[in-house]
Amino acid sequence: DTAVSQTPKYLVTQMGNDKSIKCEQNLGHDTMYWYKQDSKKFLKIMFSYNNKELIINETVPNRFSPKSPDKAHLNLHINSLELGDSAVYFCASSQLQRNEQFFGPGTRLTVL
Amino acid sequence: AQSVTQPDIHITVSEGASLELRCNYSYGATPYLFWYVQSPGQGLQLLLKYFSGDTLVQGIKGFEAEFKRSQSSFNLRKPSVHWSDAAEYFCAVGAPMKGNKLVFGAGTILRVKS
């Protein structure tokens, strides 16, 4: 009965490839987020969706495209992967009015 | 724009000793404040949160934090540290008027010596 789940947990790929990370929450929340944690453990928001509508879009290369098929899912697709994309990507969810965000276990992306 | 400063990159305490992790924030309105903990290779677990009301909030695992508006601080405390508390701790400020984005501090690594 995992609250926020992500797949895969680890992703190793070559530069230039396209990859996707999936996120699902079973908490009934209306808002989902993607965060990036870099090698220095610094966490920064990338995107947020509320009821399938994009509400936060930070300064992120347009190689990154989030997609929310429904309120319980938020996927992250990355085109033309670069070395600098190597990081841990965390999905989170909350009720918009509460802002108490629950995080998934993370996906460690390594670009070779 | 909101920001968070955690002045201590590393802190080492002896098991059984008290702990205080510092957090200062900058935000133009009443903030939502959070402390999260991250164990190695794990996700982030919410320890406690402040939205409004009582400025001393209790969290899980025996942690508490005090919101001091005059000092723009939200320091995390624990009276007696256990070896299992060794982890990285992140303070975050939430912006309810900006889509709820959380802005995190750089984190404080806690080491516990026996």
Image (cartoon, coloured by chain):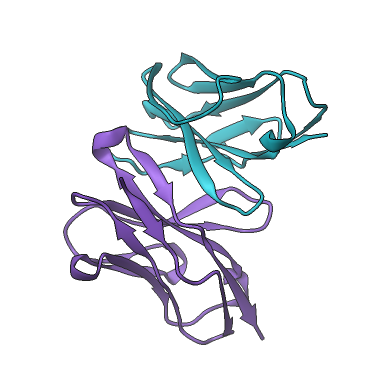
Chain colours: A cyan, B purple
Residue A61 in which image quadrant: top right
In the foreground, A32 or A76: A76
Lateral position of residue B94 relative to residue A57, left or right? left
The residue positioned 67% from the left and 34% from the top of the image is A85
Residue B82, quarter of picture? bottom right
Q: Position of residue B51 (x, y in %)?
A: 24, 52
Image point 61% across, 70% down: which residue?
Answer: B86
Look at 68% across and 52% down and name the residue there.
B41
Q: In this view, does A91 lie above or below B74?
A: above
Residue A83 visible at all: yes
Residue A97 at least partly seen:
no
Question: Relative to the observer, which residue lies in front, A96 or B27?
Answer: B27
Q: In this view, does B34 lie to the left or right of A6?
A: left
Quadrant into which the C terminus of chain A falls: top right
Picture coordinates of residue B62, whole percent (x, y):
43, 71
| A65 displayed left or right of A59 | right
If the image is split into quadrants, where does the N terminus of chain A sit? top right
In x, y percent, where is residue B42? 64, 51
The structure residue drawn at horizontal position 57% and vertical position 21%, both measured from the top left corner, is A75
> Which image quadrant is residue A37 in?
top right
- Left or right placement of residue A10 versus residue B29 in this view: right
Percent coordinates x, y for residue B6 in the rendering: 44, 65
